[in-house]
Image (cartoon, rainbow, N blue to C red):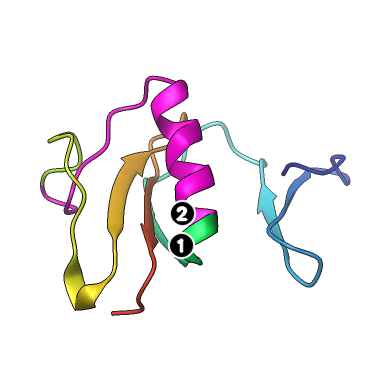
Amino acid sequence: MTCERVNYFAPVRLNDQMTLLFSDETPEHESHHYAFHVSDAEFDAIFDRIKAAGLSYGSDPGDYENGKLNNWGGGRGVYFKDPDGHLLELMTVPQ
């Protein structure tokens, strides 16, 4: 859930206790990998939104467009790129 912009920061609220502030000071940026440990219900909801948006997804960082999930550690995991080119990872069991 994105919150209202504060100065040049773009806050992204993850839950009631955590908000990330992203800086938009320069037009160019490096691609980064962000991993999120989520519950099964959260994974299902987010994964449904990934599919509804038509985003490519995959089972590992080297093949994030293979259309598969992983089951590392006995949970589920998926990788996908956000519109800015960052590689996002969701996992139900921390690695």
Label 2 SS: helix
Residue at horizontal 50 percent and vertical 33 percent from the top: 49
- Percent x, y for residue 91? 36, 64
Residue 84 appears anywhere in the view: no
Label 2, on which residue?
A: 43
Magenta span includes 80: no
- Percent x, y for residue 73? 21, 78
State the extent of the magenta-drawn residues as a range. Answer: 42-62
As drawn, the label of residue 32 is: none
Residue at horizontal 28 percent and vertical 79 percent from the top: 95
Give the residue type at disc 2: Phe
Q: Nearer the viewer, residue 46 or 11?
A: 46
Q: Quadrant of residue 72?
A: bottom left
Residue at horizontal 11 percent and vertical 50 percent from the top: 62
Asked whether the residues under the numbered discs 1 and 2 touch, taking CB atoms below 8 Å apart as contact, a structural biologist would say yes
Label 1 SS: helix
Residue at horizontal 39 percent and vertical 28 percent from the top: 51
Residue 58 sits above or below residue 89 on the image: above
